[in-house]
């Protein structure tokens, strides 16, 4: 039985005051044993998360990291640095990073490996664009994206990772994949992993992300291969995020 994970991705939002209010509201909610909860914040706020959440059941993480361990990479943040702030997770391969910052499949695989080397669990994002879905090549695209990690890191690495299927056309658009569309892709990803290792395929958590809201979360999370969600916009409002966590628990 896979424990569901609901992870918030704050993206480039928030400030110390709004973060403090949001974190206080999340901490005040009754802890959910059946669901793991995490929040991923911009780098400058990781120490705030560490201070606020240490000792609580809520985990925290970064939204990106460098593929390099150290060196002359001005402006970059390494996995080891992120680990020093107690991050359990780091998102790698978010579609915004892929589209806006040149994170190719190969770079994402390097970031995945760098995270694990530092003891940080990657939340590895993949997903197709609208054009790719309309061309009927969704499963080929996500298959290629996961292959990049399978080939570089090996299937064993997926035992220490979380996958997030995030169709690009659903992120921040208010347009959600139907539960059947999500299930189809999640099942295909699990099948592909099972081709390498059945046990790891059965155990790996595959989250859905893309306009998950309090009123569609329960339906998405009821699907057999949907193990929770990566939540953008709705993770910025405590009430909405907690309602999504509750949907995952039910
Ligand atoms: C995300 O940022 O990964 C995301 C899924 O955003 P939203 O929930 O706002 O679509």
Image (cartoon, helix red, strand yellow):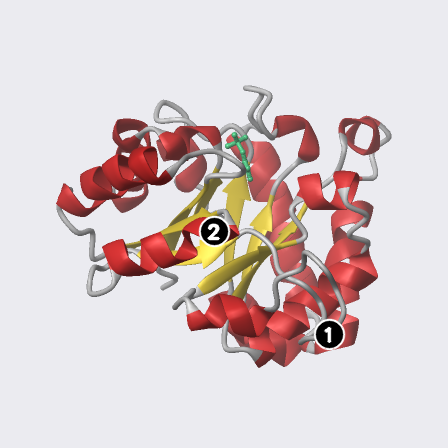
Locate residue 169 relative to residue 11 in the image: left or right: right
Residue extending furthest toward the right: 135
Q: Position of residue 65 (x, y in %)?
A: 62, 60
Q: Nearer the viewer, residue 76 or 139?
A: 76
* 153, above or below 211, in the image: below
Q: Position of residue 92 (x, y in %)?
A: 63, 56
Residue at the image point whose x is 24% and y is 35% from the top: 21
Read off the residue under disc 2: 44
Residue at the image point whose x is 53% and y is 76% from the top: 199
- Disc on the earlier residue, 1 or 2: 2
- Secondary structure found at label 2: helix
Q: Position of residue 95 (x, y in %)?
A: 69, 42
Q: Nearer the viewer, residue 98 or 14?
A: 14
Pointer 1 local density, CA inside 10 Å: few below 14, some 14–19, many at least 20:
few
Label 1 beta carbon less than 8 Å to ligand 1? no
Q: How many marks?
A: 2
Q: Nearer the viewer, residue 46 or 156?
A: 46
* 6, above or below 82, in the image: above
Q: Position of residue 232 (x, y in %)?
A: 49, 35
Quadrant of image for the C terminus:
top left
Residue at the image point whose x is 60% and y is 30% from the top: 171
Locate residue 75 relative to residue 136 in the image: left or right: left
Q: Ligand 1 quadrant?
A: top right
Label 1 with label 2: CB-CB less than 8 Å: no
Read off the residue under disc 1: 71
Does residue 101 appear anywhere in the picture? yes
């Amino acid at each position: 039985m896979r424990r569901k994970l609901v992870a918030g991705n704050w993206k480039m939002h928030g400030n110390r005051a709004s973060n403090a209010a949001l974190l206080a509201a999340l901490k005040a909610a009754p802890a959910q044993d059946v669901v793991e909860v995490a929040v991923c914040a911009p780098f400058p706020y990781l120490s705030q998360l560490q201070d606020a959440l240490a000792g609580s059941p809520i985990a925290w993480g970064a939204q990106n990291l460098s593929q390099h361990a150290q060196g002359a990479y001005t402006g970059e943040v390494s996995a080891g640095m992120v680990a020093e702030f107690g991050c359990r997770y780091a998102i790698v391969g978010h579609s915004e990073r892929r589209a806006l910052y040149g994170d190719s499949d190969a770079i994402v695989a390097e970031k995945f490996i760098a995270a694990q080397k530092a003891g940080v669990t990657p939340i590895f994002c993949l997903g197709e664009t609208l054009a790719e879905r309309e061309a009927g090549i969704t499963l080929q695209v996500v298959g290629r994206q996961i292959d990049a990690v399978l080939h570089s890191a090996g299937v064993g690495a997926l035992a220490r990772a979380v996958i997030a299927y995030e169709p690009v056309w659903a992120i921040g658009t208010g347009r959600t994949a139907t539960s059947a569309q999500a299930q189809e892709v999640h099942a295909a990803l699990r099948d592909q992993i099972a081709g390498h290792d059945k046990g790891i395929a059965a155990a790996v958590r595959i989250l859905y992300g893309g306009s998950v809201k309090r009123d569609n979360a329960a339906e998405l999370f009821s699907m057999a291969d949907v193990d929770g969600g990566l939540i953008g916009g709705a993770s910025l409002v405590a009430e909405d995020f907690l309602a999504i966590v509750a949907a995952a628990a039910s």
